[in-house]
Amino acid sequence: MTSAKIAEFYIASTVKDGGAVLFGIDGEGKLSVRGKVPMPSPGWTEIADGRICAAVTDPEVGEAYAEYSILSGERLFGPVPAEGVSLCHFSKDGDEIWGANYHTGSILHIKGDRTDLRVHEVPRDGELGCDRGRQERPHCHQCLLSPDRRFVLVSDLGLDTIFVYDRDLRPVSKAKVPDGHGPRHGIFSHDGKKLYSLAEMASSLTVFDWDGEKGILTPIETVSFRPELEGTPGFDGLTDAASIVLSPDGRHLWCSNRGTANTIAHLTISEDGRHVSLVSQTPSCGNHPRAMGLVADGKFLAVCNTFADNLTVFRVLPDGELEAVSSIPIPRPSCVNAV
């Protein structure tokens, strides 16, 4: 019997009139469209204070940050120009926002009605990675707040470095991933003592100890989650890892591989949180799984297959393995936000 309880979540659709689309999901994983908050080409979204916060492409100011009411869809704040190219991620705390401009390697800081910009430079901030095709300049990919919200961690794919800043973007420390790996997104353990950093170019995961008092990352190990697909027709070795999700119990990680792999890697975490192990790969049931997120209190994993224009939902089994249960069309899905 299908459960009557419906959980809700938003998917950002990056096409011109896509907006943030509200989906419902029942106990069996069946999906339904329940509404939409209009906004121009949202690429990254977060929900905070009854608002959907978004990196958008505004018809008047271009790439920008803006906030919209969940209830009315009215724009409540912005658009604030990104002052860079490819605003791909941001974090918000009160009236402060820190955003990563990928192509221009810069960090946008919004504080009330004031904006500042910090630009990564070579060699002031470090040396470029070894892949000159992909690491030709700094590429800021994520601005992540520390668990106590005292620090901002910026993953720079071009510099193979995670920078730690204070809230005013004053340098505190920095940590490297292996050369040519290209850090993209990180996620803290639930106890706030470890950082799991996903590297896009190598499909690898680096585990760091996090000193929350001093704002210092110390690397422990790096593990590959590349799928073994050699000999598979159409697979050219490109994986382009994208999204990382941590289970509610803190024992499982899921990381997406794009490129010609299109899989979701399942990794387990040791009891002390210091080590990760690759367990399995599950086909994403689409093309280019750019973003993922847990919905319905962690019962399901929603996967945005951006180039396939579809959203796929997987049931999370007790052992952390994934079982595909439903799929629904949506133009260029790019972000998942549980309500």
Image (cartoon, rainbow, N blue to C red):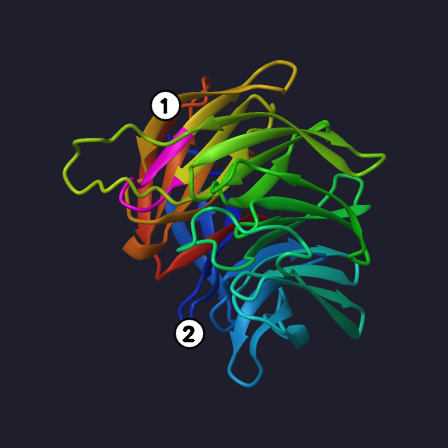
Q: Position of residue 13 (x, y in %)?
A: 43, 62
Question: Residue 295, can we see it?
Answer: no
Q: Which residue is mark 1?
A: 280
Classify 181 as above or below 132. Answer: above
In this view of the protein, which residue sits in the foreground, 26 or 329? 329
The magenta stretch spans which residues? 257-265
Q: Quadrant of the N terminus?
A: top left
In this view of the protein, which residue sits in the foreground, 318 or 60? 60
Q: Secondary structure at mark 2?
A: loop
Q: Residues under labels 2 and 1: Cα distance?
A: 36 Å
Please give left or right for residue 144 compared with residue 212 in the image: left
Q: Position of residue 185 (x, y in %)?
A: 56, 44
Q: Is residue 90 magenta?
A: no
In this view of the protein, which residue sits in the foreground, 65 or 72? 65
Classify 2 as above or below 105. Answer: above
The residue positioned 71% from the left and 56% from the top of the image is 92
Choose top left, top right, bottom left or bottom right for residue 275.
top right
The residue positioned 75% from the left and 39% from the top of the image is 147
Q: Amino acid at mark 2?
A: Lys
In this view of the protein, which residue sits in the foreground, 174 or 316? 174
Instruction: Point out the tag, 2 or 1, that comes first from the N-terminus.
Output: 2
The residue positioned 81% from the left and 55% from the top of the image is 170
* Residue contact between numbered discs 2 and 1, judged by CB atoms under 8 Å: no
Classify 91 as above or below 177. Answer: below
Q: Is residue 263 magenta?
A: yes
Please give left or right for residue 249 compared with residue 229 in the image: right
Q: Nearer the viewer, mark 2 or mark 1?
A: 1
Question: Residue 319, can we see it?
Answer: yes
Q: Amino acid at mark 1?
A: Ser
Classify 325 as above or below 182. Answer: above
What is the residue that sits farthest to the top in this orientation? 271
Q: Which residue is mark 2?
A: 16
